[in-house]
């Protein structure tokens, strides 16, 4: 009886354990095999060809500096030397002194004196950049010196301005006229002097004693067009502002017959 119970309990335990445990899966194993050696040692395998294609791709930037370059080797070494400090003369030496600073106008520089030597003209006339003689020589003195004229008291430029502002009749005419050269020629006396400047005719009779150059110089343009002589003598003077109160008309050509 006892053996029967033992066999019955043993069979129930095994069956319970076997029914509760899941079925076991076979465990996979990794097997490694070495490639067989190729008979031709100089030929490239398929793996080596794939690696070369990836390296030679145009889109891959090369290393800079190159891995075996001198710059990369020097940058990897620790710097133990102290940097040298250069002076101003070593950084930028002064330029050579050109011969133009000591040359004389019209005299060619000696050969080999400087690298900045100016070539001389053909014919031995000196440097092509030499100052022309007209600027090195003093201007010639005028043949006839203009003398200053002492004006009578009360005939200064301020007195003439006051006379114009006083409202006095300095024209001598009631209205502006069209004056041909033949009519202008008739007014060439000291007490009746007309002159034309830049197309306008003025009665210069009241201005004669106020002229800084004197009566004689002003009478040279009486009865004619004095524009050229006025511009040559003192072109910086505004004739219209000076003689605006003496305007009598405008210079016109001679009427055709």
Image (tube, grey):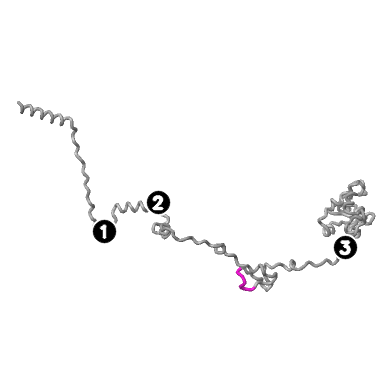
- Residue mark closest to the camera, 3 vs 1: 3
The foreground one among 224 and 143 is 143
Nearer the observer, 80 or 24: 80
Left or right, 73 with reference to 131 = left
Residue at 86% x, 63% y is 146
Magenta segment, prevailing SS (helix, strand or loop): loop
Mark linked to residue 147: 3
Q: Are marks 2 and 3 in contact (CB under 8 Å)?
A: no
Q: On the rendered structure, is 124 left or right of 87?
A: right
Q: Position of residue 208 (x, y in %)?
A: 91, 55
10 vs 129, left or right, is left
Q: Residue at x 82, y 67 (%)?
A: 141
> Circle 2 — which element?
loop
Which marked residue is nearer to the observer: mark 2 or mark 3?
A: 3
In magenta segment, residue 112: yes
Q: Which residue is mark 2?
A: 60
Could you tell me which secondary element the residue under label 1 belongs to? loop
**Residue 168, relative to residue 141: is it above or below?**
above
Q: Residue furthest right?
A: 191
Whole-angstrom CA distance, mark 2 to mark 1, is: 30 Å
Tell me the magenta residue range.
110-115
Residue 41, labelled with which disc?
1
- Specify which label sits upstream in the sequence, 3 or 1: 1
- List the single residue furthest toward the left: 1
């Amino acid at each position: 009886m006892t053996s029967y119970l033992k066999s019955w309990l043993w069979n129930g335990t095994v069956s319970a354990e076997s029914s509760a445990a899941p079925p076991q899966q076979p465990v996979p194993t990794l097997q490694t095999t070495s490639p067989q050696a190729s008979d031709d040692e100089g030929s490239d395998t398929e793996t080596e060809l794939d690696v070369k294609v990836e390296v030679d791709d145009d889109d891959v930037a090369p290393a800079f500096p190159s891995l075996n370059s001198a710059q990369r080797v020097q940058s990897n070494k620790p710097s133990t030397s102290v940097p040298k400090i250069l002076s101003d003369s070593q950084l930028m030496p002064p330029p050579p002194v050109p011969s133009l600073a000591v040359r004389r106008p019209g005299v060619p520089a000696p050969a080999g004196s400087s690298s900045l030597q100016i070539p001389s003209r053909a014919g031995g006339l000196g440097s092509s950049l030499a100052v022309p003689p007209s600027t090195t020589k003093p201007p010639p003195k005028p043949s006839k010196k203009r003398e200053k004229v002492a004006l009578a008291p009360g005939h200064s430029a301020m007195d003439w301005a006051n006379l114009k502002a006083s409202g006095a009749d300095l024209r001598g005419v009631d209205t502006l006229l069209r004056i041909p050269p033949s009519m202008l020629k008739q007014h060439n006396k000291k007490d009746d002097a007309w002159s034309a400047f830049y197309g306008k005719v003025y009665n210069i009779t009241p201005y004669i004693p106020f002229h800084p150059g004197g009566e004689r110089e002003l009478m040279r343009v009486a009865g004619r067009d004095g524009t050229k002589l006025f511009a040559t003598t003192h072109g910086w003077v505004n004739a219209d502002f000076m003689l605006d109160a003496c305007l009598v008309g405008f210079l016109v050509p001679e009427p055709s017959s």
